[in-house]
Image: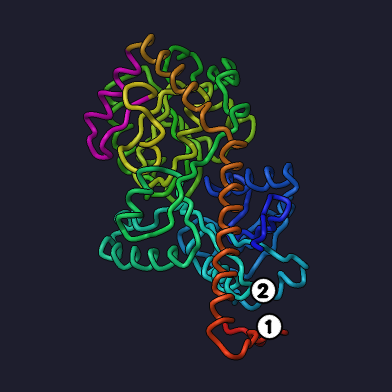
Amino acid sequence: MNAQYSPKHQRVVHFCGTIERNKDGVTRVLSKIHDYNVDQAIASLFVTASADENSEMPHITVTGIDIPHYDGYKLSITPARIIHRELRQEQFQPSLVHLHSPCTLGRAGQKISKWLDIPCVATYHTDFPSYLKYHGVSHLEQPLRVFLRRFYNRCYATLVPSQSLSRSLRESGIENIHYIPHGVDNLFFHPNFRSQAWRDAMLGANSDKKIILYVGRLVWEKNLKFLAELVSDISGERTDTQVVIVGTGPAENTLRAMMPKAIFLGLKSGYDLSEIYASSDIFLFPSDTETFGNVTLEALASGLPCVVADAGGSSDLVCHGATGFVICSQQRNDWKAALKMLLDDAPKRKSIANAAFEQAQNYRWENILAQMQTLYTGVQEEYQRRHTQTCHLVLISSPLAVSPPAISSASSYSA
């Protein structure tokens, strides 16, 4: 008889590069997964190379080395057999492995799922091949896509947060793709957080200026050179705008020099971030490498018209002309025209802001994570069904039923 799985049977081990709170969009997603699991009494454990010292998320920290020019991210160098030994010491017996990065840690998770004979799923959080053009190594894109195809096709299912990316990955040969978007905290990101006091602090005596906001890591693969050029054009042509930048990263010092009139606020979270979104007027996000665009959804929920690139997840989230504008990532004149319309037409800007808020209500975290749990259950049941069928075929085709050798110690594994 096949096992019937329910959330109370699920014990999920997540393999992720970092769980530092608010480090990036991925860590915010992981934090929401953890909170949901706690509410639903679902057991989970996070294996990571980088964690906050006082993190509330149950985790095992593995040894990692710093990744050059990548602001605090680490690459795991801990063998899979050591991680498996740590799981045994924690007395955590997972029923499913969930991978959040195709790195050495993700590969270790795949090995461990095979050793434990449990299914392995992955989320395609970051489209690394699209980053390469920003680092002058575009010729490596095809080999990297081949590697990723092999990596994700070892998984029982690959969760993808946007429809446009789903189509692209299917075309590249990745199988078993399941579309599940990310969500947004609709109480935390809301127009009600709009603050005139915050606007006065940003604008001073120029209270009639419109605030154009960017939120995200300050890394070149976010198309930030284009952002700086666009902001320079706007600042040179108009005196009624103020650009505000939220985030940190290795490109920050250069960007400050390129955008001397912009206000850089650094990394923000919690109430401060809610207030910043809601108190701005337009969200500007030219990144063409997003798999989803968490910050775009946060801006929509905060009631901001969004001007985003016609690529990646952000283009799925914004309805062109209704909740913002979706524009080819390098057509600077089209970006300027969209911004001009939003800046000059207050009724239209208000109408789009209202539509943005309404659209974001479709992305509630509790609904999104319930879909993920349903997928987990389906994967576990299907895995058990196939496993039972395979065992039955072995028994009827072999005169001797030979059990696989039990693994009694870490030395029995090859990393």
**Residue 410 got which mark?**
1
Which amino acid, mark 1? Ala
Q: Residues within 10 Å of mark 2 (few under 14, many from 20)?
A: many
Q: How many marks?
A: 2
Question: Viewed as shown, does residue 334 lie left or right of 219?
Answer: left
Assess whether residue 308 is covered by the magenta stretch: no
Residue placed farthest to the bottom in the image?
A: 400
Label 2, secondary structure: give it: helix
Picture quarter containing residue 284? top left
Picture quarter containing residue 209? top left
Residue displayed at 37% across by 50% down: 221
Question: Compared with residue 306, is residue 110 higher up or lower down, i.e. above or below?
Answer: below
Inter-mark Cα distance, 1 to 2: 8 Å
Front-most of residues 410 and 211: 410
Q: Which residue is mark 2?
A: 84
Mark 1 or mark 2: whose residue is earlier in sequence:
2
Magenta segment main secondary structure = helix
Question: Compared with residue 413, is residue 20 higher up or lower down, i.e. above or below?
Answer: above
Residue 321 image position (x, y, % from top left): 32, 22
- The boundaries of the magenta stretch are 324-344
Front-most of residues 264 and 57: 57
Residue 301 image position (x, y, % from top left): 52, 26
For the N terminus, the quadrant is bottom right
Label 1, secondary structure: give it: helix
Question: Viewed as shown, does residue 219 lie left or right of 156?
Answer: left
Front-most of residues 295 and 45: 45
Residue displayed at 30% across by 40% down: 226
Q: Residues within 10 Å of mark 1 (few under 14, many from 20)?
A: some
